Amino acid sequence: MKNLIRAFLFAAVFLPLAAKAANPVAISGNVTGPTPLAGSWVILISAGVHVDSIQTDTVGHYSFDSLTVGAGAKQVRAIRSGYATVTNNVTVVAGTPLTSNFALVAGGNIAGIVKKASDSTAVVGAKLVLRRGNTLVDSLLSDGSGNYSFTGLAAATNYTITTTAATFFLSTTNLAVTANATITLNIFLALTQPATVTGTVRNAINTNPISGAKVYLRRGSATAAISDSTTTNGSGVYTFTGVAPGTPNAWITASATGFITLTNNNVAIGNGLTVTSNLSLQSPGVIKGSLSNVVQGIPLAMTNVLVVLRRDSLNTAIIDSNRTNASGNYTFNANPGKYYVTALSTIGTQSSDSLRLTSGATLTSNFTFTQSTAIYSALSDSRQIHFTQSGDRLILDLGISKVSRTVEAFNLKGSIQQQVAVPAGVSRVILPANYAPSNGYLFQIH
């Protein structure tokens, strides 16, 4: 019975070892530098994920079993303090052991103190970021004495240290690292001193100051978030205090009722300086005019005619449009610049010459059209035609004629609205009056 118990215990103790043996070594190797480096860390990475890590034994050897590794592409990385890190890319085939050795080279080191440029005292808690090209290598904070150190760096010529600290300007240093050597690099940070941005907002026409104008401060672009805002005083003066110096530069925008908003772009903010940035605001101008149709020497207002506005040339896109009112007039409000006006009527199209609109100015551009046919304007007391309106009818007394005639009724834009044949001997014609404009009638008799 005792022998049976001993046999059971023996099997229970050694059963896990048998299970372990079922998972043979998949990746193994040695870490040297040039002698075996015991206690080095070897890390197994699969698809960018840390899978396992192990330290080398007394002869610098390591191994990962197949259960841990799995088949496929892997990375094996050897890390040792004072040596440059090395990564091997390997492909594991199920059931086939793979050897991946490392020959580590003593790395270079960078060390120094972060100090104030003004008095060389230590800057505590400065953040230092080390990159090799565009790849992040390491980052750390300076200690209580301003000290920092990066160790075990691979030899390369494209390292960059970026150092930042509150109330100090950013510092960037480029340097090269050689194997088994220490570079001493003390970094001096310049203390930032708040700047002041001030200026006067004026009327561009008469240079009078504009009080109550809103002024906005942005950093980096005209569409960036507003950093600060203020209002001009009675003398048109604005002031921003406590402005952080350096980049990004400032964009300063002023706006006021009745004026065109203006932005001063890319204003440099010097350390501790007072920066002056004045703004002269322009007022919108007016382009207006009238359209008339000359009939037998009589100018008649052209109503509801489309008038369009273009900037810089007649070939650019239309920026505004309007229609003439009952008096044949049109109006555009526009910012200063060069403009062209085009009138599009049913009896023709005309465009203005270049119109140079200045701040607050009013320009007039009239258009006169001449009707190509002989259209008569008949008033109720005309000796040629007598007419009266009765409800929705218009009664024309033409007088007796021995020949047949045709009466054509036009609107004031020159379009035929009615055409009536009048036989010889007939003196009266009745037309619908619903088309007739309120300011007169146009007829042609032939």
Image: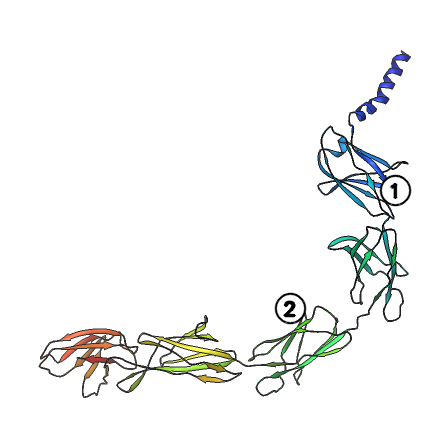
Q: Quadrant of residue 64?
A: top right
Q: Is residue 162 left or right of residue 58?
A: left
Amino acid type, residue under disc 2 in the picture: Ser
Cα separation between marks 1 and 2 = 56 Å
Q: Quadrant of residue 444?
A: bottom left
Nearest to the observer: residue 350 or residue 197: 350
Q: In the image, residue 41 lies at what x, y percent? A: 84, 41
Q: In the image, residue 408 lies at what x, y percent? A: 21, 76
Residue 149 makes an appearance in the image: no
Q: Is residue 79 left or right of residue 405?
A: right
In the depicted structure, whether residue 60 falls above or below residue 149: above
Please, what secondary structure does the residue beneath circle 1 have? loop
In the depicted structure, whether residue 225 falls above or below residue 273: above
Q: Is residue 407 left or right of residue 58?
A: left
Residue 94 marker: none
Q: In the image, residue 356 lies at what x, y percent? A: 49, 82
In the depicted structure, whether residue 300 falls above or below residue 195: below
Residue 221 marker: 2
Residue 34 marker: 1
Residue 282 makes an appearance in the image: yes
Query: Which residue sits furthest top?
Result: 1
Please, what secondary structure does the residue beneath circle 2 have? loop
Badge 1 or badge 2: first in the primary sequence = 1
Nearest to the observer: residue 139 or residue 9: 139
Residue plotted at (85% across, 47% down): 83
Amino acid type, residue under disc 1 in the picture: Pro
Residue plotted at (79% across, 73% down): 193
